[in-house]
């Protein structure tokens, strides 16, 4: 899961980023609205945490630009306590939810999970493909009823494939999503992780679920 955080209070920004990374989200962060627009032009996110009062371009402008491009990425607005008008305007402008400062991180995380869930039209954060079951909240995986232990990065790659099951994802797309800007295009790190996932999830099972689409990338699906 890849999240963009746009918040100009440096300390708060840092705390949010730290907490999200602990929860295994891959996070980009910026301190003003113009940078947020740059990030949004270059990458796809699963959700955006967007402060309303931002220098450069405020939260409303960022949101309008995004929705103007028919981009439905869920947006969680952060608003000041007295900004009731802001909240109404924010929801009218197409924000999906808002959180009033100061907020608890537990609430932030819960709302973020709910937004992402709603976006992928899943009633729960458990994804099933054939007999593969992925619990995205508990970060556990089983195949054929047997639990499989994955590293944190393996899980992130699998979760991304699973949330897009049936859709072919390029190496670069997977790499950028999971490794963020640490990802170097053209490296074979994604292939290495796919190989590990296959060994753990497909070897000895039928049908195979992780497929290579030559020249295009990888896809998780139950049909060959
Ligand atoms: Ca602010």
Image: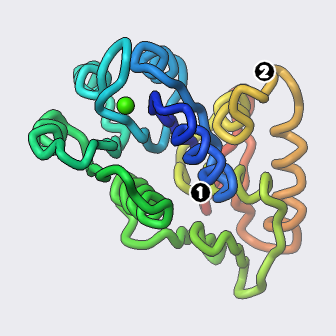
Q: Based on the displayed image, in which of its 4 quarters is residue 190 positioned?
A: top right
Disc marking residue 185:
2
- Residue drawn at the location 52% of the way across and 42% of the way down: 12
Would you say the beta carbon of the disc 1 residue lies within 8 angstroms of ligand 1?
no
Disc marking residue 195:
none
Most foreground residue, 78 or 164: 78
Residue 83 position in % (x across, y down):
17, 42
Most foreground residue, 87 or 40: 87
Foreground tag (2 vs 1): 2
- Residue drawn at the location 43% of the way across and 56% of the way down: 112
Disc marking residue 162:
1
Asked if one can make out residue 161 in the rendered structure from this viewpoint, the answer is no
Most foreground residue, 108 or 132: 108
Residue 66 position in % (x across, y down):
31, 24
Q: Mark 2 or mark 1, which has the lower sequence index?
A: 1
Q: Based on the displayed image, in which of its 4 quarters is residue 169 positioned?
A: top right
Residue 220 position in % (x across, y down):
64, 53
SS at mark 1 in the image:
helix
Task: Examine the rendered structure and indicate whether residue 223 appears above or below residue 130.
Answer: above
């Amino acid at each position: 899961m890849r999240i963009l955080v746009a918040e100009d209070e440096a300390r708060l920004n840092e705390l949010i980023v730290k907490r999200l990374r602990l929860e295994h989200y891959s996070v980009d962060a910026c301190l003003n609205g113009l940078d947020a627009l740059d990030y949004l032009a270059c990458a796809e996110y699963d959700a955006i945490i967007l402060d309303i009062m931002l220098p450069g371009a405020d939260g409303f402008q960022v949101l309008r630009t995004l929705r103007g491009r028919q981009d439905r990425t869920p947006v969680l607005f952060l608003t000041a306590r007295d900004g009731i008008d802001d909240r109404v305007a924010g929801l009218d402008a197409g924000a999906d939810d808002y959180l009033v400062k100061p907020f608890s991180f537990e609430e932030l995380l819960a709302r973020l999970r709910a937004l992402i869930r709603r976006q992928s039209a899943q009633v729960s954060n458990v994804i099933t493909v054939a007999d593969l079951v992925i619990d995205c909240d508990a970060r556990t995986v089983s195949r054929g009823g047997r639990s499989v232990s994955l590293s944190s990065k393996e899980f992130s790659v699998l979760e991304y494939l699973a949330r897009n099951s049936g859709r072919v994802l390029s190496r670069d797309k997977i790499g950028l999503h999971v490794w963020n800007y640490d990802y170097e295009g053209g490296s074979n790190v994604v292939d290495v992780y796919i190989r590990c996932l296959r060994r753990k999830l497909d070897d000895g099972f039928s049908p195979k679920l992780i497929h290579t689409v030559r020249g295009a990338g990888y896809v998780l699906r139950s049909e060959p």
